Image (cartoon, rainbow, N blue to C red):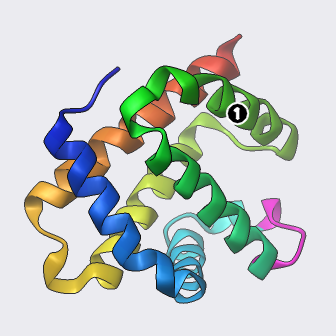
Amino acid sequence: MSLTPHQITLISQSFYKVEPISEKITEIFYKTLFAYEPTVKSLFKGDMQQQGRKLMVMLHTVVNSLNRLDNLVPVLQDLAKRHVDYGVKKTHYTPVGNALIHTLQIGLGDDFTPEVKAAWIAILDIIADTMKAEMDS
């Protein structure tokens, strides 16, 4: 479970470019997620703006933990346990990751290079693998 220093830089820089437009980013993300996987819409029962803020806080936590991913593991494990309680299935991780990649592509425009995309896929794989493993325990 690791990223290269260059991947860490790419993820961090790209996140900080979209963070100022977080409200728009989360709107795009959830619209895309619900289009990709309509069945997950029923899992969201609260205020979607609040949910969007939670998503951005978690992404900020991830980005701030890129140099010490081991510290992120317990956070992701706790999140996975809560997600199981909400009804999240392992099969939901792929559409979530795809929706986030699509959202970043829109938010970053020309700055969403193949290299940036690969870096985000790497961290999303780490996140999904960690959370899915916790769902098994």
Q: Nearer the viewer, residue 131 or 136?
A: 131
Q: Amino acid at mark 1?
A: Ala
> Residue 118, image x and y in percent?
18, 50
Reading the image, the residue beneath label 1 is: 80
Residue farthest toward the top in the current orientation of the protein: 137
Check disc 1 and report its element: helix, strand or loop. helix
Quadrant of the snapshot with the N terminus:
top left
Q: Is residue 26 above or below residue 13?
A: below
For the magenta stretch, what is the residue range?
42-48
Q: Nearer the viewer, residue 38 or 123?
A: 123
Side of 61 relative to 126 (left or right): right
Side of 135 relative to 127 (left or right): right
Residue farthest toward the left in the current orientation of the protein: 114
Quadrant of the snapshot with the C terminus:
top right
Residue 97 forms part of the magenta stretch: no
> Residue 80, image x and y in percent?
70, 33
Q: Is residue 110 above or below residue 58?
A: below
Q: Residues within 10 Å of mark 1 (few under 14, many from 20)?
A: many
> Residue 71, image x and y in percent?
56, 24
* Image point (45%, 50%), residue name: 63
Quadrant hosting residue 24 = bottom right
